[in-house]
Image (tube, grey):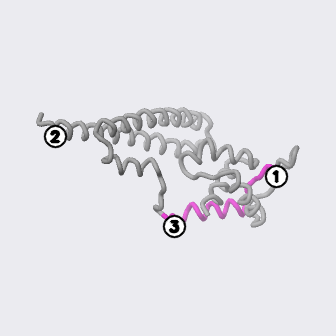
């Protein structure tokens, strides 16, 4: 159900083709919030059109269609945004699962994983910060993306700080265990 609203939200920002929406999922929203593949997006666009929530704004070469949200679609999106989420959990995150299971590794291996976590999170934070600066410069509707970008920046910063703390904990355990 959330794919429906993700598409409505993206189309609320500006009309897009199915290809453009697929690219936006693979490059942005899919990496951080909601993943969707080409094979999921097109059937949902068809349903949204049938339900009157979006319309074909333009047809181009080779059957390319540009979709736009309708007033009814905007109302549906707005109503969904104002309701509390029905599901707060149910996350499947292999990376976090691996963190739960770090105790299966020796301390040096666990520190390596945590160091890689810091490096990866730093790169992601910097990339999102660059997007954030673009959103701020864009003003208008693009400014709304700045809020989500700031969330990502803060999440990656928290991950970096947590991984640094975890390395300190492992190092302290190692020192205490060696009788130092």
Disc 3 versus disc 1: distance between alpha carbons?
32 Å
Tag in front: 1 or 2: 2
Q: Nearer the viewer, residue 70 or 34?
A: 34
Mark 1, Cα crowd under 10 Å, few <14 / some 14-19 / many 20+, is: some
Q: Which one is nearer the viewer's eye here, 36 or 151? A: 36
Which residue is disc 1 drawn over?
Answer: 57
Image quadrant occupied by the C terminus: top left
Q: Residue at x 53, y 34 (%)?
A: 127
Query: Which residue lies at the image location 23% right of the left edge and 36% below the top edge?
Result: 171
Q: Which residue is mark 2?
A: 177
Q: Nearer the viewer, mark 3 or mark 1?
A: 3
Helix, strand or loop at disc 2?
helix
How far across and how far down the image is residue 112, in percent? 36, 35
> Whole-percent x and y of residue 143?
58, 42
Q: Nearer the viewer, residue 101 or 91?
A: 101
Lower position in the chain sequence, tag 1 or tag 2: 1
How many residues crowd mark 3 within 10 Å: few (<14), some (14–19), many (20+)?
few
Q: Which label is found at residue 86? A: 3
Q: Residue at x 41, y 35 (%)?
A: 116
Residue 70 shows up from this direction? no
- Looking at the image, is mark 3 or mark 2 earlier in the sequence? 3
Q: Is 67 contained in the magenta span?
A: yes
Question: Along the horizontal axis of the image, is 78 left or right of 15?
Answer: left
């Amino acid at each position: 159900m959330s794919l429906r609203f993700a598409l409505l939200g993206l189309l609320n920002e500006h009309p897009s083709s199915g290809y453009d929406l697929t690219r936006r999922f693979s490059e942005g929203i899919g990496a951080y919030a909601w993943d969707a593949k080409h094979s999921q997006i097109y059937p949902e666009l068809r349903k949204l059109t049938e339900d009157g929530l979006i319309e074909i704004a333009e047809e181009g070469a080779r059957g390319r269609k540009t979709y736009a949200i309708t007033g009814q679609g905007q109302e549906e999106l707005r109503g969904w945004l104002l309701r509390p989420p029905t599901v707060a959990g149910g996350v499947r995150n292999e990376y976090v699962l691996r963190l739960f299971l770090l105790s299966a590794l020796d301390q040096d291996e666990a520190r390596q994983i945590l160091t890689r976590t810091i490096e990866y999170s730093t790169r992601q934070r910097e990339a999102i910060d660059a997007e954030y600066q673009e959103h701020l410069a864009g003003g208008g509707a693009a400014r709304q993306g700045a809020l989500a970008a700031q969330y990502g920046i803060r999440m990656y910063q928290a991950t970096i700080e947590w991984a640094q703390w975890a390395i300190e904990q492992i190092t302290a355990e190692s020192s205490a265990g060696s009788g130092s």
